[in-house]
Amino acid sequence: MKARVTVTLKTGVLDPQGKAIEGALKSLGIDGVASVRQGKVFDIELDGDKTKAEAALKAAADRLLANTVIENYRVEVLG
Amino acid sequence: MKARVTVTLKTGVLDPQGKAIEGALKSLGIDGVASVRQGKVFDIELDGDKTKAEAALKAAADRLLANTVIENYRVEVLG
Amino acid sequence: MSRNEPPITPELVASHGLKPDEYERILKLLGRTPTFTELGIFSAMWNEHCSYKSSRIHLRGLPTKAPWVIQGPGENAGVIDIGDGQAVVFKMESHNHPSYIEPYQGATTGVGGILRDVFTMGARPIACLNALSFGDPSHPKTRHLVSGVVAGVGGYGNSFGVPTVGGQVRFHTRYDGNILVNAMAVGLADADKIFYAAASGVNMPIVYLGSKTGRDGIHGATMASAEFDDDSEEKRPTVQVGDPFAEKLLLEACLEIMAKGCVVAIQDMGAAGLTCSAVEMGAKGDLGVDLDLDSVPTRETGMSAYEMMLSESQERMLMVLKPEKEKEAEAIFRKWGLDFAIVGSTTPSRRFVVRHGGDVMADLPIKELESEAPLYDRPHVPSPQLPVIQAREVAPSLTTADALEKLLAMPELCSKRWVWEQYDHVIGGNTVQRPGGDAAVVRVEDGPKGLALTVDVTPRYCEADPFEGGKQAVAEAWRNITAVGGRPLAITDNLNFGNPERPENMGQFVGCLKGIAAACTALDFPVVSGNVSLYNETNGRGILPTPSIGGVGLLDDFTKSASLAFKAEGHPILLIGDTQGWLGQSVYLRDICRREEGAPPPVDLAAERRNGDVVRGMIHAGTATAVHDVSDGGLLVALAEMAMADGIGAVLDAAPAAIVPYAWWFGEDQARYIVTVHERDLLSVFTKLKAVNVPCIQIGLTGGHEIAIAGERAVDLKVLRRGFESWLPDYMAGKP
Amino acid sequence: MKSAVLVFPGINRERDMARALRLVSGREPAMVWHAETSLPEGTDLVVAPGGFSYGDYLRCGAIAARSPVMDAVRAFASDGGLVLGVCNGFQILCESGLLPGILMRNARLRFICHDVHLRVERSDTPFTRGYNAGQVIRVPVAHGEGNYAADEDTVRRLEGDGRVLYRYCSASGEIDDTHNINGAAQSIAGIINERGNVLGMMPHPENHVEDTMGCTDGRGLFAGLVAHLERAA
Ligand SMILES: Nc1ncnc2c1ncn2[C@@H]1O[C@H](COP(=O)(O)OP(=O)(O)O)[C@@H](O)[C@H]1O
Ligand SMILES: [Mg+2]
């Protein structure tokens, strides 16, 4: 089974990377960019059934993939 | 307008981070994980209409956000 | 004044960490109820972190003066003169609570904060050190905290581009719920171009520099002064994120405008950001400050005055600018891609006025915000005196050789290489002595001068006897500098203690400070900067009292520094200083005999000075081929460290008959050094030391690949080194 | 030797590099700001130094590689000019297409700073003529992302063309996994481009050029460049 965990910064948390990228896009002359926030995706292959996989992914996100102090995450099982 | 660019490693490109996470998940006792690949997402706010935005995003991805030697990207305009 | 602010209620006051009598003080001072923004300002200015209300009266007892001190405590950092028109600027600061909640970001912002303190004064940072205290290795959180904190310290320093050259790492169950992250930064400046916080001149523009303001860490300073309880992890979103890249740009931009003569006064925004920095500039300069928050660069929309005044967004500065230099300064900041905004001006009124959206949100007497802050002489009781452990009563459970092998492979004494190899300690190309020795040595520009830098404290001594422990921390820093050939000049301190409202904790604080003061006085080693971190306590259990001492010394010629590695075979090994075999509070007693007991070794400051001066003299004269002070673990551990460093062993005489062997080898008597010399210099050294009454005996010869004590099993250096080097990496890999 | 050191925001070993160039060549290098569109007249060596350009955000070296001065550097290289990239500089050269491949996170995912040994694979290039082929030198590394990676074809071509100039090795010159500190393909520490005028390497020779600092093994690289340029002049 394939799944994707997407981890993004909580609103209001400073994103130095996003800020630097924003600046770089502007100086490359790419127009109209108002803001950039960077996050991570984890593409995970798992064994087992869907409910078990979802529980495992949630555990993985909570305990390792996301830093829930400053990040949110979303789990999608793609089948 | 909001958009998301997702950048992932091409198949075959070694992903030390993904490998390490895979190992860490296993040692945390999270079952059934067969493989992990790490990628990036960029949540971008843009001005302008949809076609212009899409062109700008493609340019951003080609010229900066992805290293197309080793990475693929996907652009989604979320409206 | 009109505004959409909540009404002031007793609950609101309490949630700002202000006690009822403190709130009474505010009412009396203002003659009216404060606004919400004003309440926030008071809470920031009057909390423990900014006002030092519990510690101030005791800090006054510290010696802070010497002919080479340019600036003592009270500014962003201390400044000392190192000759040739050069000055060293340094300070240490804690980021304990944030690092427990979010180890990576907590540590990065700690390092960022202390670097800013140093370059705000016009100095280019040239070295960082760090002192880290973690809980017991078996505590479920410890590994995660170590890995996050170390990555964070490195992540910031490496990117900013300053070598991290030394520090300490310890583990003890008393830090289980309350780790300590103390970061020290050292910078170099021209002695006649030091910048201060005090504003001068009326109607001068006040400029905001650096990154934009967000809602980061609002109430961070209050958090740093609150005791932890189990749900403190709920307070998480107040954690700030560090941006070392922005700080590197800020450094370069600040040094550039300083060099161009644009700056009248400058202050970084640390804890309680805009509030503390603006008040300090005004109060120190005897001026009022008028701030217009509409001009503050923000990165979030709809920020209130309260939020802007209390935000702890990182990488920001406040500056009073020479009006005629405005364009030039702005151009420099734009070039570095940083925000630059005039946000206010100085006034003759001595009032602190904050405007936002057409309203006056705060109007306070500026000097009183500092001078009227509460000041407490909290009750304190002395720690009970512990009995002196008699060495003969201790039943050794292991042979000397086995004990040595075991001690070197345990958390207290094992190599901390796993930590410092994650820090770039060579950038700058000036690191003469890297981590792993006594003090780090950093060349000053192209030389020939060098700085000797170290951080020290032995918390178990401070717990057992605060006065002796305080003395010992200073003495050990002085000794580590001496052991590389440096002349100790001054210290910075970072006083980490538990809840000061408990008389036992306050007693520890008072005792340690008296000890520090005594040692600083006796050793001519004044305190020029420091930081106090109280309330390091979880569920009523305080940390070990941990007054970290950061020492700075000077070498006139860095090429003449000594290091601890044995240099060649056949060098006589000398022990300098007196040994009685003091086992109380030793690592041996605790980790081998499982007894964390007794009075710690007393520190004879006159002997420290005498012995140290002699050792330094031998280094300068070129007679010492290797030098190491004897500290944690005692004589044999120090010898093993010297041997492991380059793989040259030692053949050692048996312990003298008057002292039981384990006390001789593992006792932690103070004021001692091991020095090796050339055979040919032996006699003259003995004669010289005798003449000045410094105890010195030969205890063996260098050589071989073992630590070989007469009558004991010889221990192979490879075996020792394997244990020494593997405990920490194995632990971090989850092995034990 | 007239060298130019590129200064990108966030770069931090530019002073170390400038000092090494000055000590070995006897001449102060020009410091060139990233926003410049040309190199100083008569430049014969361009150096991209170490550091964290743009905080190493996005990908190491990615943003710097797209700055204005890099167009000038590309033109300079295609005219045969010598270009050296160290650490972040190596990453920038890869991102800018001057060198193939990419530097990934270290296999153990931690930043590493310590001395390493490098085997100099050949001595007949401007970047190695100060050494003998097979010589082992000791220089420090300080990086979190130095794990060289490229597709199999590229690596095969690099090896076939002898374009790997420096490799991580033991003190006696053995190449094996234990000494491959960051997991790089083929223990690669430094490579040149096809034409042989652009070198990228992760370790820091510029930190080992002074006697009084304990080791001068890095000197050979700079001394070799000086000798090469003198010969050419
Ligand atoms: N957190 C750290 N960062 C950098 N260096 C460290 C750290 N912890 C320990 N070290 C280094 O390890 C060596 C041994 O530390 P320690 O046993 O505390 O020394 P000493 O007993 O001489 O004070 C010192 O060189 C010290 O600088
Ligand atoms: Mg020592």
Image: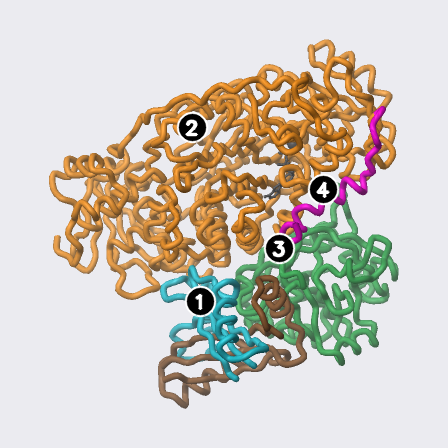
Chain colours: A cyan, B brown, C orange, D green
Question: Is C723 colored magenta in this rendering?
Answer: yes
Depth check, mark 2 against mark 3: the one in front is 2
Disc 3 residue crowd, few under 14, some 14–19, many 20+, Cα 10 Å:
many
Mark 1 chain: A
Secondary structure, mark 1, is helix
The residue wearing badge 1 is: A19
Region of the chain picked out in magenta, as a range: C710-736
Disc 3 C-beta below 8 A from ligand 1? no
Q: CA distance from mark 3 to mark 1?
A: 23 Å
Q: Nearer the viewer, residue D227 or C277?
A: C277
The residue singled out by tag 3 in the image is D13
Instruction: Give the residue at x 87% y 28%.
Output: C570
* Identity, as a three-letter code, of the amino acid under mark 1: Lys
Vertical side of C657 occupied by C70: above or below: below
Marks 2 and 3 sit apart, C-alpha to C-alpha, by: 42 Å
Left or right of C583? Residue A24 is left
* Same chain letter for marks 2 and 1: no
Position of C355 relative to A47 (above/below): above
